[in-house]
Amino acid sequence: MRKIYLHKRFDSFDYIDISLMKVKAIKMLHWIWVLIVGGVIGLIAGALTGHGKSMNWIANILAGLIGSSLGQALLGAWGPQVAGMAIVPSILGAVILVIIVAFVVSKFRTA
């Protein structure tokens, strides 16, 4: 195993290994946080449109994440941000997405 020296006096191989583990843990926690915030945004969008009871938690997360991308693409990233998502444009984008998906699904059910 090759040792990496960052300083002439110290063997910092263990320090690098621990810091890489911390970075991986932080990245994993970031993605968990993104999924939670996406689910909450999807839940709010479902409640605002009245279609929240027909959506399960996976649909809430997808609506929140896709709606967040849609809202920030259309409206920009202004306002408070949580987990890299601007809250107001994300909720508006998720509402637009839920309305469009509900319309398309209702057309398929009647056909």
Image (tube, rainbow, N blue to C red):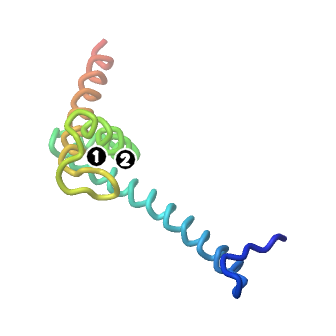
55 relative position to 18: left or right: left
Residue 40's place in the image compared with 109, above or below, is below
Residue 42's place in the image compared with 102, above or below, is below
Circle 2 — which element?
A: helix
Please state which amino acid type lies under the numbered disc 2: Ile
The numbered dot on residue 11 is none
Q: Would you identify the image quadrant in which residue 105 lies?
A: top left
77 relative position to 61: left or right: left
Instruction: Tell me, yes or no, if residue 46 can be seen here.
Output: no
Q: Tell me which residue sits at (50%, 61%) in the image.
A: 27
Q: Nearer the viewer, residue 21 or 5?
A: 5
**Mark 1 or 2 closer to N-term?**
1
Q: Residue furthest front?
A: 8
> Does the residue at mark 1 contact the one at mark 2 (Cβ under 8 Å)?
yes
The numbered dot on residue 61 is 2
Instruction: Tell me, yes or no, if residue 19 can be seen here.
Output: yes
Which residue, given by chain and number where applicable, does mark 1 sit on?
42
Please state which amino acid type lies under the numbered disc 1: Gly
Q: Residue furthest right?
A: 1
Q: Nearer the viewer, residue 97 or 54?
A: 97
Spatial CA distance of label 1 from label 2 is: 6 Å
